[in-house]
Image (tube, grey):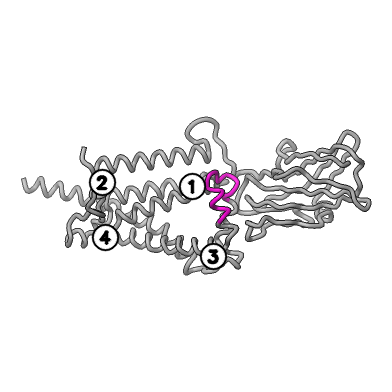
């Protein structure tokens, strides 16, 4: 009987551990994106620089559909765009680190999924293959898988939190009580 | 079914729908013919061509945008053809560059990746638009004309086409 329980527990552990490569890959994608802009080449966040990342957004416009209006408002007010980009870059770094280290992986998996969807206006770009759509699809699926699995519960900070505090809901309210913090 | 299982299925459905919907809108990769708008450049006229005669020359204002093609480098117009039943004028790259008297760039294009030179003719990055004012080397007779903007390696039928009237 205890052997069976132990076997089941091992299986659960293997399942959670198997998300480690995904946690690293998705986490590093976001961390790299943030570091490139905020640390490695800060000119990317400077509206007066030719490297300013918002310049790239111009290329999204022709087939951005519903997103065209909001994108134009960012482009026409570079300071607003720069502020948004600085906040987004900070989020990229925080989300990336959280996923890599398995900290609140359900919450940050959810946020990473939303950030992946923010690539939708650029999904049509990809002259040699379906670049942006593939990036979006894999980042979204990866983030949601991490969220569903609570992937930080093994070899992550969440493992410590889980052992110390047990299962904690985001908030003790209907429906939301089923969403775990880690 | 347990709550967490229902939640997992719900989020999986959201992921599947998002991937398929965005793929279909972007590339038609679920149903119907495939397409990829970021392969070949495509110039379009954003507004009707404004043309007038002044001081022995014809001026034409071309408000154009590159709406398709790769995002890594600019697209160019290397040949402009203006014709009607009796007249045909062709401007090559250097002819285009020497005809440009003013360029008004889009306010949203921070990089201002728009311009002209002897070897590219008119060029602009994907997504931006601009108004090029050209002073033609001739003065066109009053009448109705068709104008074509040609892009390298693309057939004539892919050229941006518009018309204008000189009164």
Residues drawn in magenta = A60-73
Residues at marks 4 and 1 touching, judged by CB atoms closer than 8 Å: no
User: Residue B124's x, y, as percent?
Assistant: 69, 53
Name the quadrant of the C terminus of chain B: top right
Alpha carbon of mark 4 to alpha carbon of mark 2: how far? 26 Å
Residue marked by disc 4 = A156
Q: Using a 10 Å C-alpha cutoff, classify the residue at mark 2 as few (fewer than 14 neighbours), some (14 to 19) or many (20 or more).
A: few
Q: Any magenta on residue A61?
A: yes
Residue marked by disc 2 = A175
Residues at marks 3 and 4 touching, judged by CB atoms closer than 8 Å: no
Residue marked by disc 3 = A44
Q: Is residue B50 left or right of residue A173?
A: right
Q: Chain of mark 2?
A: A
User: Residue A63's x, y, as percent?
Assistant: 57, 44
Q: Residue furthest front?
A: A173
Q: Are marks 4 and 1 on the same chain?
A: yes
Asked where in the image residue A50 lies, by quadrant, the reply is bottom right
Could you tell me how many numbered marks the image carries? Answer: 4
Q: Mark 2 or mark 1: name the one nearer the start of the chain.
A: 1
Name the residue: 53% across, 39% down.
Answer: B27
Secondary structure of the residue carrying tag 4 is: loop
Q: Any magenta on residue B81?
A: no
Q: Mark 4 or mark 2: name the one nearer the start of the chain.
A: 4
């Amino acid at each position: 009987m205890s052997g069976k329980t132990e076997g089941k527990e091992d299986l659960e552990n293997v399942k959670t551990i198997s998300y480690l490569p995904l946690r690293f890959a998705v986490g590093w994608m976001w961390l790299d994106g943030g570091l490139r802009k905020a640390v490695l080449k800060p000119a990317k966040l400077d509206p007066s620089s030719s490297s300013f990342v918002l310049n790239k957004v111009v290329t999204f416009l022709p087939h951005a559909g519903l997103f065209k209006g909001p994108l134009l408002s960012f482009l026409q007010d570079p300071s607003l765009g720069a502020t948004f980009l600085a906040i987004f870059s900070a989020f990229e770094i925080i989300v990336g680190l959280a996923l890599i280290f398995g900290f609140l992986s359900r919450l940050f998996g959810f946020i990473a999924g939303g950030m992946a969807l923010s690539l939708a206006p650029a999904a049509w770009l990809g002259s040699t293959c379906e670049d942006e759509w593939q990036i979006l699809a894999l980042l979204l699926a990866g983030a949601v898988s991490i969220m569903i699995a609570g992937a930080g519960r093994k070899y992550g900070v969440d493992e410590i939190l889980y052992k110390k505090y047990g299962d904690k809901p985001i908030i003790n309210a209907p429906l939301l009580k089923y969403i775990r913090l880690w | 079914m347990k709550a967490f299982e229902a939640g997992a299925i719900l989020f999986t459905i959201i992921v599947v729908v998002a991937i398929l919907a965005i793929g279909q809108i972007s590339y038609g990769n679920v149903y119907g013919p495939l397409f990829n708008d970021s392969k070949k450049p495509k110039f379009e006229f954003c507004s009707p061509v404004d043309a007038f005669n002044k001081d022995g020359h014809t001026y034409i204002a071309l408000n154009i945008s590159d709406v398709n093609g790769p995002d890594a480098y600019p697209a160019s117009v290397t040949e402009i053809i203006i014709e009607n039943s009796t007249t045909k004028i062709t401007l090559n790259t250097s002819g285009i560059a020497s005809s440009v008297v003013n360029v008004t760039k889009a306010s949203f294009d921070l990089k201002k990746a728009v311009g002209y030179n002897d070897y590219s003719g008119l060029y602009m990055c994907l997504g931006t638009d601009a108004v090029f004012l050209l002073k033609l080397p001739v003065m066109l007779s009053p009448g109705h004309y068709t104008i074509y903007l040609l892009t390298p390696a693309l057939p004539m039928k892919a050229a941006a086409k518009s018309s204008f009237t000189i009164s």
